[in-house]
């Protein structure tokens, strides 16, 4: 258990989905956690799973599908190099002619987290799904599932977590 936090629930599983507003358009979906900020309630994330629809396989074209889960709003999908991104996935298809296709896939959930106590703490009232495709003829879709638990933070910890989260945007 992280210092300064007291669990107030068992494990909670939250599932959400997102669809691009139009093909190849960055789209963000806000997921409300319904935390009680007056009681300094936070959500301790223990695991994240992302399932993004593969991009189109188009002749002589590089197509992509990128998705992330973040603690604050973003203007791009982003990756694990940004502190507000909890998990990210990317699928790229590079097609050269009709017979040569290279598929590259990455998901941060493919690597074990070495039994960490948690992978992130959400101190504001929501999290975000971020999705964008490139060179696709259709709108992409994706799903995410978060596992975690609610906890009450002491005043100093809650202030530090909230400030850190808001400044990471």
Image (cartoon, rainbow, N blue to C red):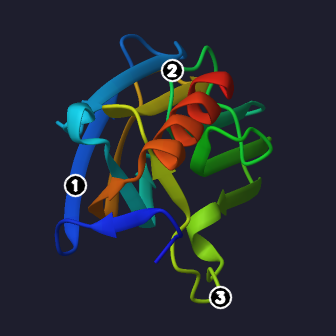
Which of the pair 130/71 is nearer the observer?
Answer: 71
**Residue 150: image x %, image y %?**
26, 59
> Left or right of 125: which side holds 116?
right
- Label 1 sits on residue: 14
Are the residues tagged 2 and 1 within 8 Å (C-beta)? no
- Counting residues from the start of the chain, the first of labels 2 and 3 encountered is 2
**Residue 159: image x %, image y %?**
51, 35
- Counting residues from the start of the chain, the first of labels 2 and 1 encountered is 1
Using the rendered view, name the quadrant where residue 107 is placed.
Answer: bottom right
Looking at the figure, which quarter contains the C terminus? top right
Using the rendered view, name the quadrant where residue 148 is placed.
Answer: bottom left
Provide the secondary structure element on which disc 3 rests: loop
What crowding class fits label 3: few (fewer than 14 Cα within 10 Å), some (14-19), or many (20 or more)? few
**Residue 38: image x %, image y %?**
22, 32
Provide the secondary structure element on which disc 2 rests: loop
> Left or right of 28: which side holds 117?
right
- Counting residues from the start of the chain, the first of labels 1 and 3 encountered is 1
Provide the secondary structure element on which disc 1 rests: strand
Are the residues tagged 2 and 3 within 8 Å (C-beta)? no
Are the residues tagged 1 and 3 within 8 Å (C-beta)? no
- Label 2 sits on residue: 73
Above or below, comparing residue 23 to residue 46 in the picture: above
Q: Residue at x 44, y 56 (%)?
A: 50
Mark 2–mark 1 distance (CA, rounded to whole Å) = 18 Å
- Label 3 sits on residue: 114
Above or below, comparing residue 141 to residue 75 in the picture: below
What crowding class fits label 1: few (fewer than 14 Cα within 10 Å), some (14-19), or many (20 or more)? few
Q: Residue at x 49, y 20 (%)?
A: 137
Mark 1–mark 3 distance (CA, rounded to whole Å) = 22 Å
């Amino acid at each position: 258990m992280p210092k300064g936090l007291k669990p107030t629930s068992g494990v909670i599983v939250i599932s959400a989905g997102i669809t691009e507003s139009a093909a190849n358009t960055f789209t963000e979906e806000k997921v409300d956690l319904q935390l009680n900020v007056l009681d300094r309630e936070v959500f301790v994330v223990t695991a994240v799973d992302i399932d993004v629809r593969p991009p189109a396989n188009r002749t002589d074209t590089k197509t992509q599908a990128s998705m992330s889960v973040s603690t604050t709003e973003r203007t791009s999908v982003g990756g694990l190099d940004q502190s507000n991104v909890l998990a990210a996935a990317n699928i790229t298809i590079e097609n050269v002619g009709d017979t040569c296709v290279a598929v590259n896939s990455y998901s941060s959930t493919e690597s074990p987290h070495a039994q960490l106590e948690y992978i992130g703490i959400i101190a504001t009232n929501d999290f975000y799904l971020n999705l964008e495709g490139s060179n696709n003829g259709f709108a992409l879709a994706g799903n995410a599932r978060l596992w975690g638990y609610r906890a009450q933070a002491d005043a100093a910890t809650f202030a530090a977590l909230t400030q850190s989260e808001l400044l990471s945007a």
